[in-house]
Image: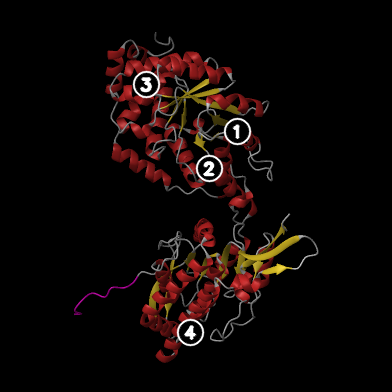
């Protein structure tokens, strides 16, 4: 059952439910005061001029441009895809975003609209956002996304099972969905706003990594609080420790509540300081956001033009 | 030993309905007309300008969407609250401008009257500047004035209250929202005025008051892509052509102001109101 490349300790953790529990509860506890203080301390770092412009361009290339509304239409997805290719048509040197993130029934539209651009199509699945359905329905949801051509699948974990301590069930579910994804990347949404403690966040992150998730993602964006800097610190520590233990690079995606360039730059500083500079790439770090992109574009214009811009100069979606 | 400790007031900015310190952390000493220290005022930076414009833009749909009648009521309420703080304003104006107590009283009276005068214009200006146009075709053609958007106001440097009210009230009466840079050396009445605005039904963000140097903040406002109109009254006459040039990139409406500061006690006309309004003409087919 365990992946052959895993070191013995990690392979042993996945042997059965009780060893999984023993492993997860054996993880060191998170120092709440410490992690919040470190996150706040790093957030005061001042990034200016050329470094800021670099950070803005990097952040734009890391955005998963997202629309997850009940009112989404094919037209809106096509408009979003056009924006993903050319975020700022007046400035053709603006990098394209990393991916467009939609519901699975709209994934085919996004794939059509993004053909040949190299921009990924991420689809949420597994009864997003609550994750409350049977395993069969969740797998069918993933299949719809994958057959529509999605290159990335964002699944939600069963928070109820996790909080009840049924780690084996959550683990099995992630594994089955990973298998159903085929070549598509799997991002595992922990919905940290519902996990109550940093210790739980750390356990859920390790559980997702053990089960084969390519990314750990903070939130659905439907629950408040969504992504926060301290929670992202805990996830970044988990992927860094995973890399130390196994040599594999896994990614992190904070999602929800990141609206300003200043916020985005703080996350990039955290990535650099907590995980390491090799994570500063769209392959390993993403922002799940919708309104963030416009603020990045406005700040980019401000940096290049030397004066402030306004929301009239970018497209509203 | 004094009976009690003096309670000195902290003078801060007024942005988005709150009273923050400057983002830059800077402050500067303010003296009265004789050079005695009065207080430390916040020294706003370009980032405070940025925040103030965002707040003003956010408040614009709400304020411009209120009925002209309601806007008049709110502005009249400002005059009422201003009147209630008459003594405080008179003392601040006397200290700032070095005028006699009597003269300061009459300047505050004039400021309250000015505010009432503009409050009365809110539901009348459309009749004066609007028109039913005679056209050669089967159409009704109407022209109606509509508020321009966010206005940047560099307040007069010498007249600390009456001058400020004379340039700010028309912005609000027209339905625009304002970012005001107060007089550099006489900013205290402007901050007290923001306390009046904060407590008199003017929605948060409709007026944002920055204290600092017009020469430093003016160019950021003039070149800002999200500011629609500029009143350069408080800028140095030699700097105004450069401000107008920077404003031209975004087709801002830049008010023509006299080279030297005018006598603000003279009765105003509707020129400033007109400056903050855009004419919209509607053609409507006549019945079948």
State which tag comes first along the sequence, 2 or 1: 1
Q: Quadrant of the N terminus of chain B?
A: bottom left
Residue linked to disc 3: A207
Identify whether A139 is placed above or below A63.
above
Please state which of the two labelled residues, at mark 3 or mark 4, is closer to the viewer: 4
Residue B254 relative to residue B1: left or right: right
Please state which of the two labelled residues, at mark 2 or mark 1, is closer to the viewer: 1
Disc 1 secondary structure class: helix
Quick check: can you spot residue A123? yes
In front of the other: B171 or A32? B171
Disc 3 secondary structure class: helix
Which portion, as a residue range, is magenta? Answer: B1-9
Residue linked to disc 4: B110
State which tag comes first along the sequence, 3 or 2: 3
For marks 3 and 4, give the CA distance.
72 Å
For marks 4 and 2, give the CA distance.
46 Å
Please state which of the two labelled residues, at mark 4 or mark 2, is closer to the viewer: 4
Residue linked to disc 1: A77
């Amino acid at each position: 059952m365990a992946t052959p490349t895993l070191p013995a300790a990690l392979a042993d953790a996945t042997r059965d439910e009780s060893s999984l529990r023993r492993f997860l509860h054996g993880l060191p506890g998170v120092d709440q005061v410490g992690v919040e203080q470190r996150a706040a301390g790093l957030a005061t770092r001042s990034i200016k001029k050329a470094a800021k412009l670099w950070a803005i361009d990097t952040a734009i290339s890391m955005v998963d441009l997202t629309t997850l509304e009940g009112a989404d239409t094919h037209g809106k997805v096509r408009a979003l895809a056009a924006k993903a290719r050319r975020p700022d048509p007046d400035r053709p040197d603006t990098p394209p975003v990393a991916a467009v993130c939609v519901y699975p029934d709209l994934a085919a539209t996004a794939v059509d609209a993004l053909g040949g651009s190299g921009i990924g199509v991420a689809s949420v699945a597994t009864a997003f956002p609550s994750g409350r359905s049977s395993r069969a329905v969740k797998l069918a949801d993933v299949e719809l996304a994958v057959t529509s051509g999605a290159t990335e699948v964002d699944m939600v974990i069963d928070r109820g099972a996790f909080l009840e301590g049924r780690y084996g069930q959550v683990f099995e579910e992630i594994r089955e969905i990973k298998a159903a994804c085929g070549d598509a990347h799997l991002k595992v949404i922990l919905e940290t706003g519902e996990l109550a403690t940093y210790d739980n966040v750390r356990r859920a992150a390790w559980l997702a990594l053990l089960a084969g998730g390519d990314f750990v993602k903070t939130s659905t964006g439907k629950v408040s609080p969504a992504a926060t800097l301290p929670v992202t610190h805990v996830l970044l520590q988990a992927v860094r420790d995973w890399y130390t233990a196994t040599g594999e690079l896994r990614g992190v995606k904070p999602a929800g509540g990141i609206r300003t360039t200043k916020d985005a730059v703080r996350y990039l500083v955290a990535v650099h300081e907590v995980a390491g500079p090799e994570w500063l790439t769209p392959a390993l770090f993403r922002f799940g956001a919708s309104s963030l992109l416009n603020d990045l574009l406005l700040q980019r214009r401000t940096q290049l033009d030397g004066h402030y811009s306004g929301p009239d100069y970018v497209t509203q979606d | 030993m004094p009976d009690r400790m003096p309670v000195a007031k902290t003078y801060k900015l007024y942005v988005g309905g709150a009273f923050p310190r400057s983002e830059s952390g800077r402050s500067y000493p303010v003296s009265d007309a004789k050079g005695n220290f009065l207080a430390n005022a916040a020294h706003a930076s370009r980032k405070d300008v940025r925040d103030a414009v965002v707040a003003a833009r956010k408040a614009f749909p709400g304020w411009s969407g209120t009925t002209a009648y309601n806007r008049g009521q709110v502005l009249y309420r400002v005059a009422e609250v201003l009147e209630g703080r008459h003594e405080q304003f008179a003392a601040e104006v006397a200290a700032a401008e070095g005028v006699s107590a009597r003269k300061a009283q009459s300047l505050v009276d004039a400021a309250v009257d000015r505010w009432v005068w503009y409050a009365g214009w809110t539901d009348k200006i459309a009749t004066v500047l609007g028109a039913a146009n005679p056209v050669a075709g089967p159409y009704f053609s109407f022209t109606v004035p509509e508020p321009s958007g966010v206005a940047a106001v560099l307040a007069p440097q010498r007249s600390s209250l009456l001058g400020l009210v004379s340039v700010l009230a028309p912005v609000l009466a027209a339905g625009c929202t304002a970012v005001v840079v107060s007089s550099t050396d006489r900013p205290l009445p402007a901050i007290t005025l923001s306390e009046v605005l904060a407590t008199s039904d003017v929605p948060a963000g409709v007026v944002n008051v920055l204290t600092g140097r017009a020469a430093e903040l003016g160019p950021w406002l003039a070149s800002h892509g999200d500011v629609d109109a500029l009143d350069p009254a408080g800028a140095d006459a030699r700097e105004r052509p450069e401000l107008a040039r920077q404003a031209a990139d975004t087709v801002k409406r830049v008010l023509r102001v006299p080279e030297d500061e005018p006598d603000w006690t003279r009765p105003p006309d509707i020129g400033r109101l007109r400056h903050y309004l855009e004419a919209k003409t509607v053609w409507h087919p006549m019945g079948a």
